[in-house]
């Protein structure tokens, strides 16, 4: 229990996997949820006599492990009554585990018991695959057996686990975890019956006959995957509802039952419970009728993190995306069609939504702190942040460069809010706040000019105009830093591809661009792209210098 409680999914996987496989651990943690640790014991008491505070729920028959033990020691499988029970971990644990799975094997030959205790054949750590489909399972199997350096170690299908049975895949690597001494064994738990068993089990394996003759039809998996995609809107709205209610903020203090949480947030207990159960399948919370707690993923929905992002994407932007088909047919803007006016005009008319928007922009800027790491501001006298919002990026830069002064330039209402925000820090006396319109003119005389997530809001013509305004205001020795999310030219998966569609919906002429497209825009306005540095979440800092 101590070991499981003190490790998150990614940390535990980094321990279990051999060698330097941190990237494998991170990839597995994104696609799986840590479920439990498993041990085998040899009780002399009947299951009903075991301590009630240890065991949660009735025992279930073991199928896969029973067969493995029987074959290992040449015992008749029918007479080996191995059962499975679970010990629930106390809430408040640091790690992501739900419980400990205990295989109860009737006490038998001393040689068998000694061997199991010494070798830990059945001791392992289990991951439950999130939203499994055949393609994902094949990729996970390749990941674990390839860069993960683990070998298949048996598996099968247990029809007694869960409402539709469960496929289990075991993997093993040489060595043990120090100092605890646990064997390096991993299990994937996959709801339902899956063809991956045919890959995992060697030909002629004793478990091979347990493969169902009616494996999921080949055309069902694409249908299941498409249904998952089509119901993505349901996930967005469930997350938005949780954000509106402040569910994450309330669960930060500790687990809550559905009823107690409903009372705290002012919600219907039954409907909240059903939404929480759905969020549990998304990996946002974990628990059951006895209580719900946040996962590491769920903590990102708290205030100051992505709460306002969820409210924005499930609110105004959700409505605008409903007009995407109209926009694609006509070439007109989806936001205007859905809400009757241009995006920024709408925000000016609805200050409550503008507040959520600016909160979302700040929350989606977790990479701001890395900008001073990839751009050297030492020796820079003045940084001019064009359309700098509430000053979040400028605050990071000034904190990292004590000798630098800042100029925050934005619309009058935004500058007023920035003054209140910066007034809560000790940086306001190093900032000049200037109101204006960057499509007309920007402040003169800076050493570094910042355009952070600005150009993607505009079409090419307006981008060149904004860049030209910066060029006219800049000394020949100044630099321009453009922070955007470039589209990879080689087809590499990137958030920029989805965000490009988002920009078409929620901006007039907005779009994401490739590095080459940014290079051409800069050249048109009198700049030369001289450097590009990656940031988190597929962002990049592009540095440009004036050309003569």
Image (spheres, rainbow, N blue to C red):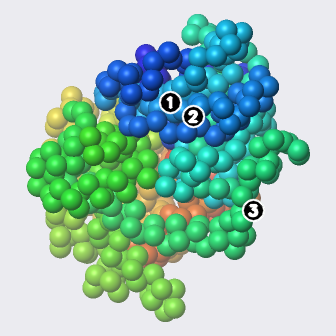
Q: Secondary structure at mark 2?
A: strand
Query: Callout 2: 10 Å neighbours few (<14), some, many (20+)?
Result: many
Q: Earlier in the sequence, mark 1 or mark 3?
A: 1
Residue beneath label 3, please? 213
**Pointer 1 and pointer 3: residues touching (CB < 8 Å)?**
no
Question: As displayed, is residue 412 above or below residue 125?
Answer: below
Q: Residue at x 27, y 46 (%)?
A: 289
Residue 186 percent location from the top left of the image: 64, 31
Q: Nearer the viewer, residue 28 or 260?
A: 260
Earlier sequence position, callout 2 versus callout 1: 1
Figure check: 374 above or below 408: above
Choose mark 3 or mark 2, whichever is in front.
3
Q: Which residue is mark 1?
A: 101
Counting residues from the N terminus, which is met first, the one under dot 3 or under dot 2? 2
Residue that sits furthest to the front in the current view: 79
Q: Residues within 10 Å of mark 1 (few under 14, many from 20)?
A: many
How far apart in space, not on screen, are marks 2 and 1 (Cα)? Answer: 9 Å
Rendered view: 305 above or below 486: above
Gap between marks 3 and 2 measured at Cα: 26 Å
Question: In the rendered image, which residue does mark 2 sit on?
Answer: 126
Give the CA separation, mark 1 to mark 3. Answer: 29 Å
Percent of width and height locating residue 257: 22, 43
Residue 156 numbered mark, or none: none
Q: Are marks 2 and 1 in contact (CB under 8 Å)?
A: yes
**Residue 500 seen by the camera:** no
Judge whether residue 345 can be spotted in this image. Answer: yes
């Amino acid at each position: 229990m101590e070991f499981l409680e003190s490790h998150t999914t990614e940390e535990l996987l980094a321990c279990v996997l051999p060698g330097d496989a941190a990237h494998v651990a991170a990839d597995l943690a994104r696609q799986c949820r840590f479920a439990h640790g498993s041990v085998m014991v040899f009780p002399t008491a009947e299951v009903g006599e075991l301590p009630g505070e240890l065991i949660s729920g009735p025992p279930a028959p073991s199928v896969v492990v029973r067969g493995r033990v029987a074959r290992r020691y040449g015992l008749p499988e029918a007479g080996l009554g191995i059962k499975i029970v679970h010990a629930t971990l106390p809430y408040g644990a640091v790690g992501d585990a739900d419980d400990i799975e205990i295989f109860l094997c009737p006490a038998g030959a001393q040689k068998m018991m000694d061997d199991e205790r010494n070798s830990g054949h059945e001791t392992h750590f289990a991951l439950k695959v999130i939203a499994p489909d055949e393609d994902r399972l094949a990729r996970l199997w390749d990941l674990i057996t390839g860069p993960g350096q683990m070998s298949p170690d048996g598996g099968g299908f247990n029809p007694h686990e869960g409402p539709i049975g469960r496929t289990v895949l075991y993997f093993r690597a040489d060595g043990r975890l120090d100092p605890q001494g646990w064997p390096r064994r991993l299990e994937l738990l996959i709801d339902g019956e899956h063809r991956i068993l045919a890959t995992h089990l060697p030909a002629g394996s004793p478990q091979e006959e347990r493969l169902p003759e009616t494996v999921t039809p080949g055309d069902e998996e694409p249908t299941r995957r498409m249904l998952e995609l089509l119901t993505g809107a349901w996930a967005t709205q469930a997350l938005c509802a949780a954000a509106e209610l402040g569910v994450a903020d309330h669960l930060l203090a500790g687990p809550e039952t559905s009823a107690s949480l409903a009372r705290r947030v002012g919600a219907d207990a039954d409907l909240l419970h059903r939404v929480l159960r759905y969020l549990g399948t998304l990996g946002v919370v974990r628990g059951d009728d006895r209580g719900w707690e946040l996962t590491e993923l769920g903590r990102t929905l708290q205030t100051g993190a992505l709460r306002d992002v969820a409210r924005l994407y499930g609110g105004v932007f959700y409505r605008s995306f409903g007009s995407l088909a109209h926009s694609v047919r006509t070439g007109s803007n989806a936001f205007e069609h859905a809400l009757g006016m241009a995006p920024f005009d709408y925000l000016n008319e609805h200050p409550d939504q503008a507040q959520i928007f600016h909160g979302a922009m700040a929350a989606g800027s977790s990479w701001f702190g890395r900008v001073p790491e990839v751009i050297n501001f030492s020796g820079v006298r003045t940084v001019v942040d064009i359309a700098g919002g509430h000053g979040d990026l400028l605050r990071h830069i000034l904190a990292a460069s004590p000798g630098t002064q800042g100029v925050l330039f934005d619309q009058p209402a935004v500058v007023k809010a920035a003054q209140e925000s910066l007034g809560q820090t000790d940086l306001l006396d190093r900032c000049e706040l200037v109101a204006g319109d960057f499509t007309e003119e920007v402040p003169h005389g800076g050493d570094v000019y910042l355009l952070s997530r600005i150009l993607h809001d505009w079409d090419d013509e307006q981008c060149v105009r904004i860049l030209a305004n910066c060029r006219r205001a800049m000394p020949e020795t100044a630099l321009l830093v453009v922070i955007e999310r470039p589209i990879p030219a080689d087809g590499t998966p990137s958030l920029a591809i989805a965000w490009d569609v988002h920009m078409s919906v929620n901006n007039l002429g907005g779009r994401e661009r490739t590095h080459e497209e940014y290079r051409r825009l800069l050249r048109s306005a009198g700049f030369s792209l001289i450097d590009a540095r990656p940031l988190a979440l597929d962002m990049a800092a592009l540095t440009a210098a004036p050309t003569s």
